[in-house]
Amino acid sequence: MSTRKRPVSNLLGLAVLGLLLERPMHPYEMATTLRERNKDTSFKVKTGSLYDVVESLVRAGWIAEHSTERAGRRPERRVYAHTELGRKEFMSWLDELVRTPAREYPRFLAAVSYLGALGPERAVRALRERTARLNEEIDQARQTQAEVLRHQTPRLFVIELEYALTMAEAERDWAGRIADEIQDGTLAWPELTTRQGRQVWTDQGGREEHEEHEGRQA
Amino acid sequence: MSTRKRPVSNLLGLAVLGLLLERPMHPYEMATTLRERNKDTSFKVKTGSLYDVVESLVRAGWIAEHSTERAGRRPERRVYAHTELGRKEFMSWLDELVRTPAREYPRFLAAVSYLGALGPERAVRALRERTARLNEEIDQARQTQAEVLRHQTPRLFVIELEYALTMAEAERDWAGRIADEIQDGTLAWPELTTRQGRQVWTDQGGREEHEEHEGRQA
DNA sequence: ACCCGTATAGTCGAAACCGACTATAGGAGG
DNA sequence: CCTCCTATAGTCGGTTTCGACTATACGGGT
């Protein structure tokens, strides 16, 4: 029942609503605030999109123009505030995002789907480099985390860092394990050969040729 | 030096190249083939995007029209094949995708960034439901995996399922742990109060009010 | 012999997204 | 006091993405 289509799909809209719950702001300030709080690792903060998103939130009646200030002859600042509807919708959007896992398409998942094409040696090299880079990023993230917490920021406010760290570690470990398995032969590597001008896989010890579909054209 | 901008950003292009490496195909067939092989969990297969992507791959010279068949008076089928350039670029694209972790913005990460706004009870309920749903999805995925492997498909060809499973489990465990920590009080929950018409957090036992930025407006 | 649901194959316009650009203000340095 | 660099605030147009739509073929039931 709950999932009538939302008028704003861009997640940046969630951040906007979250900020406006604290106090009215103009879009530019939202952007800088999000960056100051390191929320730009969770949200894709692009100026262009931001103004678009704000506009559609207005159209939806979730936020409304609050005032328009002007300092000197600089562009005027359109300040927005949430509406009562916006406050409720923010909550229910948030709630649904937490409740409901969504199909997403991370780049690495796509790449792994064709890992076979790289050949075992190249695959191992690439996977090893990924684990190394992930390790650097993990160290980095742990440092920012420690830094932020030292400033008395409640842990709850940077809990997304813990999530990101956990997932990065899981990915690093997986990539490392698979690299190991390729090297020690645990993960069998069918031979890629070219026959009649096209590539086919020869699964040593299995069927001669791997075809997952019936021939369907003449 | 390797990262001159790629002419095709949509990852569906990677899938197209991968398929054409096997044999020439027309777009519609690519879509059905991807679905048959369960690769539509790794790639967002939308008809519209597919034809767009194919066109830009042609423009880039990575694939080329191979022939145009026609069966009866049905719309003609434009069959494409990879070029030599396309074969190389496929490899290097794949290689880079594996080597280089990218900043991505999963929905759950965004949601977790504002978890505090839900309040402890509602957050726990939502997190519990997520773990439950993830468990169902994990069971499902494990069944398809077992099913596919029973058909002698080499493990390498469905290795992305293992990755997806690992990540889903990591997320499930994290969500469960956080729900536990909220309930047993390990994860402190600052009080959300309304003061002067705006929401502020009161970190019990810490500073009176949590403000992460200097006041910057009058 | 005819009707209809599904499979085949692709087109097209609208929305979403983003990067490059405009323009003013303020402050540091020479 | 003039210049230049950065911060402030936002606009605009091109590209990407996608979902809804078109149109034919085929097979099975009645």
Image (tube, coloured by chain):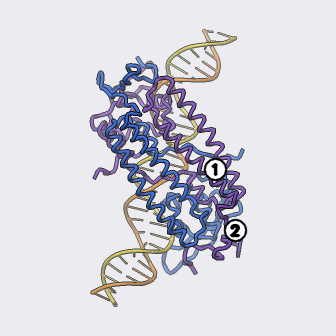
Chain colours: A blue, B purple, C orange, D yellow
Residue A44 screen position, x and y as percent: 50, 57
Specify the subunit that label 1 lies on. B
Please tell me which residue is depicted at 60% across the width and 58% down the height of the picture. A14
- Is circle 2 on the same chain as circle 1? yes
Q: If the image is split into quadrants, where does the C terminus of chain A sit? A: top left
Q: In the image, is residue C18 above or below residue A77? A: above
Residue B104 screen position, x and y as percent: 48, 52
Q: If the image is split into quadrants, where does the N terminus of chain A sit? A: top right
- Residue A55 visible somewhere in the drawing: no
Mark 2 is surrounded, within 10 Å at the Cα level, by few (under 14), some (14 to 19) or many (20 or more) other residues, namely some
- Residue B147 visible somewhere in the drawing: yes
Please tell me which residue is depicted at 48% across the width and 29% down the height of the picture. B37
Q: Which residue is mark 2?
A: B191
Q: Nearer the viewer, residue A77 or A14?
A: A14
CB of mark 2 within 8 Å of CB of mark 1?
no
Is residue A193 found left or right of B206 in the rendered image? left
| Front disc: 2 or 1 | 1
Q: Nearer the viewer, residue A91 or B113?
A: B113
Is residue B59 found left or right of B194 in the rendered image? left
Residue A10 screen position, x and y as percent: 56, 53
| Amino acid, disc 1 | Gly
| Amino acid, disc 2 | Glu
Please tell me which residue is depicted at 62% across the width and 66% down the height of the picture. A20
Mark 1 is surrounded, within 10 Å at the Cα level, by few (under 14), some (14 to 19) or many (20 or more) other residues, namely some
Mark 2 vs mark 1, CA separation in Å: 23 Å
Q: Nearer the viewer, residue A97 or A59?
A: A97
The image quadrant of residue B208 is bottom right
Q: Which residue is mark 1?
A: B176
Q: In the image, is residue D2 above or below residue A31? A: below
Please tell me which residue is depicted at 56% across the width and 51% down the height of the picture. B107
The image quadrant of residue B78 is top left
Q: Secondary structure at mark 1?
A: helix
